[in-house]
Amino acid sequence: MRRYKNKLFAILLSVLAVISFTSCDGYEWREAQLVRYSTITAASNGAIVENIAVNYDFVEVSGRYDRIDDIRFHGGYIDINTRDYIRGFDLRLSNSDAYLSVDVLNSVGGRLEGRQVDDFLNAVVEVVRRNGYATIYVDGTASNRASFELVFFIDIDAYVSY
């Protein structure tokens, strides 16, 4: 009988320890956006060279939360705002072979959408998810000292603890 009580005591102690050390945090998926603005100015020779850092700091989640543990891609687009002549540029992604070639028609900028843009933005989310950060490399040509704003809007879900 004594051995039975010792085993029962050990089991009860184990259950109590598991309950005591269980985290009280809740987790849930929430709608979010990863938004990254960047103003780019061409050099005096018209070369466009820019590195745009993207990480969890650019994720916007509604409501109170402690941390973001994961993200997943839903869709998105890229806005180009300019009044200057920009011939075009290429977007490449660090730690990935993702690539997007952009032709700017009539120097008016506009919105980039579609399957190729979604593939590129999905790659951005996956690199941020895997490494915690990504760098988007911008390479192109424009008129001397041309300036434009490049805005990445990515709809995601964020797995947050609260």
Image (cartoon, rainbow, N blue to C red):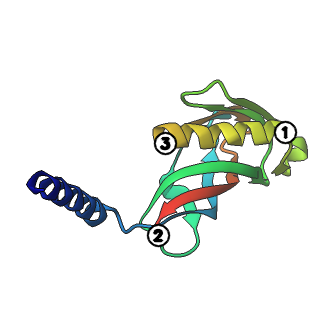
Q: Quadrant of residue 45?
A: top right
Give the labeled residue for mark 2. Answer: 65
Q: Which element carries disc 2, helix, strand or loop? A: loop
Name the spot of residue 39 as percent of width and height, x first.
62, 52
Q: Amino acid at mark 1?
A: Arg
> At x 9% / y 56%, what residue is drawn?
2
- Along the polypeptide, which appears first: circle 3 or circle 1? 1
Instruction: Tell me, for residue 115, which label it has, or none.
Output: 1
Relative side of 56 to 47, left or right: left
Name the spot of residue 6 as percent of width and height, x first.
12, 55
Q: Amino acid at mark 3?
A: Tyr
Marks 2 and 1 in Cβ contact (< 8 Å): no
Q: Quadrant of residue 50?
A: top right
Q: Residue furthest right?
A: 106
Q: Which element carries disc 1, helix, strand or loop? A: helix
In the rendered image, the quadrant that contains the C terminus is bottom left
106, 154: nearer the viewer = 154
Label 1: how many Cα within 10 Å (few below 14, some 14–19, many 20+): few
Q: Which element carries disc 3, helix, strand or loop? A: strand
Give the labeled residue for mark 3. Answer: 133
* Residue 50 visible at all: no
Viewer-side label of 2, 1: 2
44, 41: nearer the viewer = 41
Spatial CA span between label 3 and label 1 = 23 Å
- Along the polypeptide, which appears first: circle 2 or circle 1? 2
